[in-house]
Image (cartoon, rainbow, N blue to C red):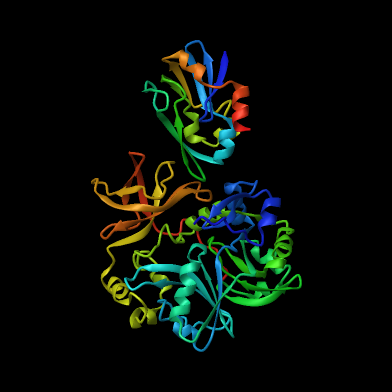
């Protein structure tokens, strides 16, 4: 198991050829109180950099960008009814997708925790 | 504008209270405090919020027959505005569009006018050029603080008993902690409350006195926006602008009968025609059925799929507990209960036209 971070403030928890992805606590704090999430569906394929969802806070709408290429294998459906969980435990219960990785070598382009901590200062 | 944003007399207090400062209309203002937008919104509806609105322009008009002269610029009955009363209104342009909205108070020996922050530079020359024989003085040495919510009467009244005696849209001058303030019972949240004009060097002291009340917490621009949206109140630049007429903006209530009949204000021809025959579009409340907020510029379609208008203000309404919006729909549409579709990021989201406000106004009449 290894965890990676993207410059778009997502975390990617890798187990074999699948990964769980979500937004970081820092991202959730910056967005403010989250009131809505729009998610892709199971089976959707995407490439790194694609918009794979939208999070709306009381302030504004923000896109979620794919940190790597992959396919959605599970969607955290709880978030539709309780988007506020994204503020409470964005790095725990409030994961957004489980995905199948298409190209594990892309993980090398992401940051480790120290790198991410340096990014957010 | 390349100028650095200006700071209000309350800037240091905002920073001390943990306000998250943003540039708004050229002013460095708190968008929220640590409580958060939703918390501040809910606190204001339940108890009282204190808002810094010092970025708005405060203007004093002195001269003969100021109210009558204002009627040449506004479709409101300011000539008959009694001493101690305030009235919402707007400047119209020659095409019948809205140049700005404002509050005019008859303060006895002068008139007190509050205009939008971004439009001070338009409005003051406009008044100076068109109000013959009226001395137009912009006030730069006073803060403007709004205390809004059901507890506002206690928050302000405990320090200033005269405030309790005011009714909605009444104004007076009274001491708060020994500081002479102009206190007006009005606001822009849909709640009971006051706007208080305070000498700048005493603004923090008086604000602290309000905040010392258990029921009063600071609230930022974020909560101010969601509160006014739920209250169905227009935001200049979003819901109303130089091209929209007051009839289109569903502001007929803000034009008094005599003025609507007589005319005699800029753009009267268009406004009177629209009053008689209806306007090409009108501002309505829109309640999305799902959870997705519909923000400014979202397209509104009728169920047949034709575009009928656009959202002008929208977001999440904490008191409503879901998304709320306002927007314009073309003539023939806009009856409460009408089903429409909103196109949000390319997806069709169902919504319904509703009557405004979303949250019952709670004024002390």
Across and down, in percent, residue A59 comes to 51, 46
Across and down, in percent, residue A2 comes to 57, 15
Q: Which quadrant: the C terminus of chain B?
A: bottom right
Camera-side residue of A77 and B64: B64
Camera-side residue of B269 and B322: B269
Residue B265 sits above or below residue B291 on the image: below
Q: Which residue is found at the position 48% from the left and 55% from the top?
A: B230
Left/right placement of residue B222 relative to residue B165 reads left
Residue B47 sits above or below residue B351 on the image: below
Q: Which residue is found at the position 56% from the left and 41% from the top?
A: A32
Question: Which residue reaches farthest front?
Answer: B2
Camera-side residue of B181 and B258: B181
Across and down, in percent, residue B130 comes to 43, 80
User: Is residue B183 something one can see in this rendering?
Assistant: yes
Q: Which residue is found at the position 74% from the left and 58% from the top?
A: B212
User: Is residue A39 something one can see in this rendering?
Assistant: no
Q: Which residue is found at the position 72% from the left and 74% from the top?
A: B175
Across and down, in percent, residue B257 comes to 38, 79
Question: Which residue reaches farthest top?
Answer: A16
Residue B344 sits above or below residue B243 on the image: above
Q: Quadrant of residue B157?
A: bottom right
Residue A20 sits above or below residue A7 on the image: above
Left/right placement of residue B14 relative to residue A17 reads right
Left/right placement of residue B351 relative to residue B123 reads left
């Amino acid at each position: 198991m290894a965890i990676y971070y993207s410059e778009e403030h997502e975390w990617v928890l890798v187990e074999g050829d699948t990964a769980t992805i979500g937004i970081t606590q820092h991202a959730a704090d910056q967005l403010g109180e989250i009131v809505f999430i729009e998610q892709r569906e199971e089976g959707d394929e995407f490439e790194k950099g694609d918009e794979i969802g939208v999070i709306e806070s009381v302030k504004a709408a923000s896109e979620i960008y794919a940190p790597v290429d992959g396919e959605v294998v599970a969607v955290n459906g709880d978030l539709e009814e309780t988007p506020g969980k994204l503020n409470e435990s964005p790095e725990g219960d409030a994961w957004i997708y489980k995905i199948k990785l298409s190209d594990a070598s892309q993980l090398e382009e992401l940051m480790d925790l120290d790198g991410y901590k340096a990014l957010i200062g | 504008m390349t100028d650095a944003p200006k700071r209000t007399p309350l800037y240091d207090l905002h920073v001390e209270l943990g306000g998250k400062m943003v540039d708004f209309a050229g002013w460095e203002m708190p968008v929220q405090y640590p409580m958060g937008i939703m918390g501040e919104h809910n606190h204001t509806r339940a108890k009282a919020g204190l808002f810094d609105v010092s970025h708005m322009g405060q203007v004093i008009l002195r001269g003969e027959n100021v109210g009558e002269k204002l009627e040449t610029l506004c479709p409101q009955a300011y000539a008959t505005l009694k001493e101690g009363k305030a009235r919402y209104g707007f400047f119209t342009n020659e095409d019948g569009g809205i140049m700005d909205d404002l509050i005019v108070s008859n303060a006895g020996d002068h008139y007190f006018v509050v205009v939008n922050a971004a439009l001070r530079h338009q409005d003051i020359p406009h008044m100076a050029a068109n109000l013959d024989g009226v001395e137009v003085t912009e006030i730069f040495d006073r803060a403007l603080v709004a205390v809004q919510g059901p507890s506002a009467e206690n928050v302000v009244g405990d320090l200033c008993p005269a405030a309790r005696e005011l009714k909605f849209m009444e104004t007076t001058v009274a001491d708060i902690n020994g500081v002479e303030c102009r206190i007006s019972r009005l606001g822009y949240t849909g709640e009971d409350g006051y706007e208080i004009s305070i000498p700048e060097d005493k603004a923090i002291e008086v604000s602290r006195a309000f905040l010392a009340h258990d029921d009063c917490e600071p609230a930022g621009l974020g909560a101010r926006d969601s509160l006014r949206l739920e209250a169905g109140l227009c935001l200049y630049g979003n819901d109303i602008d130089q091209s929209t007429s007051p009839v289109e903006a569903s502001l007929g209530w803000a034009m008094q009968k005599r003025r609507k009949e007589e005319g005699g204000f800029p753009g009267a021809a268009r406004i009177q025609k629209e009053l008689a025959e209806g306007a090409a579009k009108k501002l309505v409340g829109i309640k999305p059925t799902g959870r997705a907020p519909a923000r400014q510029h979202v397209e509104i379609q009728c169920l047949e799929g034709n575009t009928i208008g656009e959202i002008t203000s929208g977001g999440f309404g904490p008191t409503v507990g879901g998304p709320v919006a306002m927007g314009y729909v073309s003539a023939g549409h806009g009856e409460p209960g009408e089903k429409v579709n909103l196109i949000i990021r390319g997806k069709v989201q169902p919504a319904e036209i509703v009557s405004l406000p979303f949250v019952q106004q709670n004024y002390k009449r």
